[in-house]
């Protein structure tokens, strides 16, 4: 069966080929009744636009490149899902790359996506400093939005949760439940989310106990590190473990249970992100919920403004409010 063409839709709808093209491409306003007739005819005939031909005419591929640091972190599949839905609603497809926390691989993926003529890029940078050159070079070529993590000021538009506010919610909650001897299990390196959460802990924990800012262990955003970190800090007898993300918290909880510690009776455990695993753990893990749908919507809107030519001027840095989700892992002591 031959492909349905614009001419076929025009004949079925009683409109000109030019009018059909305007309606289906959304390039110029058309009367609602005419638009309805064209869309109904296109649907009835099963018309599908030729994306390759459209790209040649408009110099737009309708695609957005997405580069993530580590897809095995369950936070990122949720973000990808929301981004895919938000971009699809605007007629855009997503090309996705996972750099495995390697800034060098990240730079190569960015170059590869640009060679495929993506219209724009969404990037969660692997490292605040080592990702900067590649991200800045890409931002000079196509609209680019940084998500969840940054690369310093003046690089590109960005949207992320307010990490300092999230950590303050955790520390205030622990203080209210009588915890004082807190300890931080975080990630080392210079990814901005890791650095911001670490700095916010150091700034706020001193109000609970002057020695608290010095009680910390730094490794990676992983379950394995969470298990190992408990052994490094357990001799300090903390009454709360503040974890930089939920994967660390899950690992810490597992190790505490192996050690025979009562959670939350002996020690409370908190996380950050609110991945599904946090609610499924036993006990459920108190954590900071990131507004993933809002994060995707804001990033899509920032990207849309740049693509439409309405985003000239200084870069915008949007910080979204987090929410504390209290579960059994930090319940007050009896």
Image (cartoon, rainbow, N blue to C red):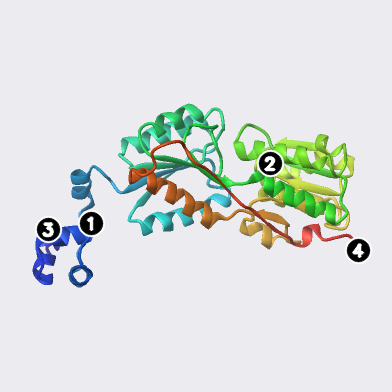
Residue 51 at x, y percent in the picture: 23, 51
Q: Which is nearer the N-term, disc 4 or disc 2? A: 2
Q: From the viewer's perspective, is the residue at label 2 or at label 3 nearer?
A: 3
Residue that carries the numbered disc 1 in the rendered image: 25
Mark 1 closeness class: few <14, some 14–19, many ≥20 residues within 10 Å: few
Q: Which quadrant is the N terminus positioned in?
A: bottom left
Badge 2 local density, few (<14 within 10 Å), some, or many (20+)?
many
User: Compared to 129, does 225 lie above or below?
Assistant: below
> Which disc number belongs to residue 18?
3
For the C terminus, the quadrant is bottom right
On residue 197, the disc is 2
Q: CA distance from mark 4 to mark 2?
A: 30 Å
Classify residue 195 as left or right of residue 177. Answer: left
Q: Residue at x 37, y 57 (%)?
A: 88
Residue that mark 4 sits on: 334
Circle 3 residues within 10 Å: few <14, some 14–19, many ≥20? few
**Element under label 3?**
helix
- Where does the image place residue 79, in percent across and percent down from the top left? 51, 52
Q: Earlier in the sequence, mark 1 or mark 2?
A: 1
Relative vertical location of residue 94 with respect to residue 154 in this rendering, above or below: below
Front residue of 229 and 21? 21
Q: Which dot, 3 or 4, sits closer to the camera?
A: 3
Give the mark nearest the N terminus, 3 or 4. 3
Give the x, y percent position of residue 145: 45, 42
Work out whether mark 3 precedes mark 1 in sequence or the reverse, and give the earlier one: 3
Asked if residue 92 is positioned above or below residue 1 in the image, the reply reads above
Q: Name the element at disc 4.
A: loop
């Amino acid at each position: 069966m031959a492909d349905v063409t614009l001419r076929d839709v025009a004949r079925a709808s009683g409109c000109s080929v030019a009018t059909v093209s305007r309606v289906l491409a959304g390039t110029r306003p058309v009367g609602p009744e005419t638009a309805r007739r064209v869309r109904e005819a296109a649907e009835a005939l099963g018309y599908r636009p030729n994306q390759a031909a459209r790209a040649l005419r408009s110099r737009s591929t309708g695609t957005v490149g997405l580069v993530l640091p580590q897809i095995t972190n369950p936070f990122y599949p949720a973000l990808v899902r929301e981004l895919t839905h938000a971009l699809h609603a605007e007629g855009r497809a997503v090309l996705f790359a996972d750099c495995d926390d390697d800034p060098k691989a990240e730079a190569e993926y960015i170059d590869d996506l640009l060679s495929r003529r993506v219209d724009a890029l969404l990037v969660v940078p692997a490292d605040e400093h080592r990702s900067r050159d590649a991200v800045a070079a890409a931002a000079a070529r196509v609209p680019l939005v940084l998500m969840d993590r940054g690369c310093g000021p003046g690089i590109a538009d960005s949207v992320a949760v307010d990490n300092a506010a999230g950590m303050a919610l955790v520390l205030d909650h622990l203080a209210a439940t009588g915890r004082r001897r807190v300890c931080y299990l975080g990630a080392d390196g210079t990814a901005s989310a890791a650095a911001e959460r670490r700095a916010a802990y150091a700034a706020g924990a001193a109000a609970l106990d002057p020695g608290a800012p010095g009680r910390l262990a730094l490794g990676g955003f992983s379950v394995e590190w969470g298990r190992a970190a408990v052994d490094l800090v357990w001799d300090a007898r903390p009454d709360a473990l503040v974890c930089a993300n939920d994967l660390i918290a899950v690992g810490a909880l597992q190790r505490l249970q192996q050690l025979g510690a009562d959670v939350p009776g002996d020690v409370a455990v908190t996380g950050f992100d609110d991945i599904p695993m946090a609610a499924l753990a036993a006990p459920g893990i108190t954590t900071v919920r990131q507004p993933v749908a809002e994060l995707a919507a804001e990033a899509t809107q920032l990207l849309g403004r740049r693509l439409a030519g309405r985003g000239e001027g200084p870069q915008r840095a949007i910080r979204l409010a987090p929410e504390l989700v209290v579960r059994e892992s930090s319940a007050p002591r009896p």
